[in-house]
Image (cartoon, rainbow, N blue to C red):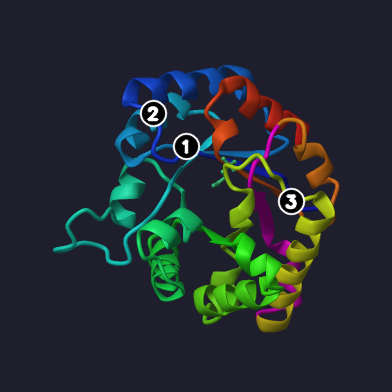
Amino acid sequence: MRKPFIAGNWKMHTTISDAINLANGIKRELVDFNKADILLCPPFTALSSVSEVIMDTNIKLGAQNIAWEKEGAYTGEISSIMLKDCGCKFAIIGHSERRKYFGESDETVNRRIKAALLGGLTPIVCVGETLEERESDLTIKVITGQLEGGVGNLSEEEAKKIIIAYEPVWAIGTGKTAAPHQAQEIHEFIRGWISDKISSECARLLRILYGGSVKPANIRELMKEEDIDGGLVGGASLKVESFVEIVKNSI
Ligand code: PGA
């Protein structure tokens, strides 16, 4: 059985004090909760402060991006060493917003994944199709390309350390969740692809999260699907109540 995994992606929200309050609220409600893995991904500026809040709890810390080099003349980038220094254990890589607004490509996704793995961080690799791609029947082609380019050259040992998040772009921040069977279809495809390309053992262990308008009201149905192992939550992770309810409803 794969343990449920709920990650809150705070995106470009929260000042340091907002982040401390949010993390404290979540900690108060979930401090003894161990039936799901819980991850908070605040903005870089709040990582250290949130790390202090959740120290000595099961709640884990992640970044929303990671540089592909360890150090050097890369203005504006944050490396695995720096992230670990802030208490991070995870890094979201290839989120559709980074692909859309910041020129992220499958190649840079792959480089960031390698850097995360080398630095001892767990990459949460995002894939997903746009509405236009879905309507043109290109979903499988797009996901295959993203998997091939992003994780296709990982060894089995490396692939066993990653998490994949399927986030249909049309469902992110729109209030339109993929129907559980629609998400399941793609999750099953992703697991099958990993099984073919890497190994069936790796596919069996791999946690695949769904992201895109996850809410307390829909996580239960999503989690009933065989290949959905958790959620990557944006908007609803910014309120203590809704995030805590999502975590509780995920088990
Ligand atoms: P959303 O965002 O829950 O606000 O749709 C999800 C994400 O982008 O990770």
Whether the residue under disc 2 has CB within 8 Å of ligand 1: no
Any mark on residue 10, and which?
1
Q: Which residues are magenta?
A: 198-215
Q: CA distance from mark 3 to mark 2?
A: 27 Å
Q: Which residue is depicted at the point 57% across and 17% down?
A: 28
> Picture coordinates of residue 201 (x, y %)?
74, 72
Query: What's the amino acid at mark 3?
Result: Ala
Tell me which numbered mark, 3 or 1, is placed earlier along the sequence: 1
Q: Residue at x 63, y 47 (%)?
A: 212
Residue 58 in view: no
Q: Determine which residue is flagged by label 2.
A: 14
Residue that mark 3 sits on: 178
Q: Earlier in the sequence, mark 3 or mark 2?
A: 2
Residue 206 painted magenta: yes
Q: Is residue 143 left or right of residue 114?
A: right
Q: Is residue 36 left or right of residue 59?
A: right
- Indicate which label's residue lies in the foreground, 3 or 1: 3
Q: CA distance from mark 1 to mark 2?
A: 8 Å
For the point 58% across and 70% down, which residue is it? 159
| Label 2 residue SS | loop
Q: Residues within 10 Å of mark 3 (few under 14, many from 20)?
A: many
Relative to the observer, which residue lies in front, 156 or 215? 215
Q: Quadrant of the C terminus?
A: top right
**Label 3 secondary element:** loop
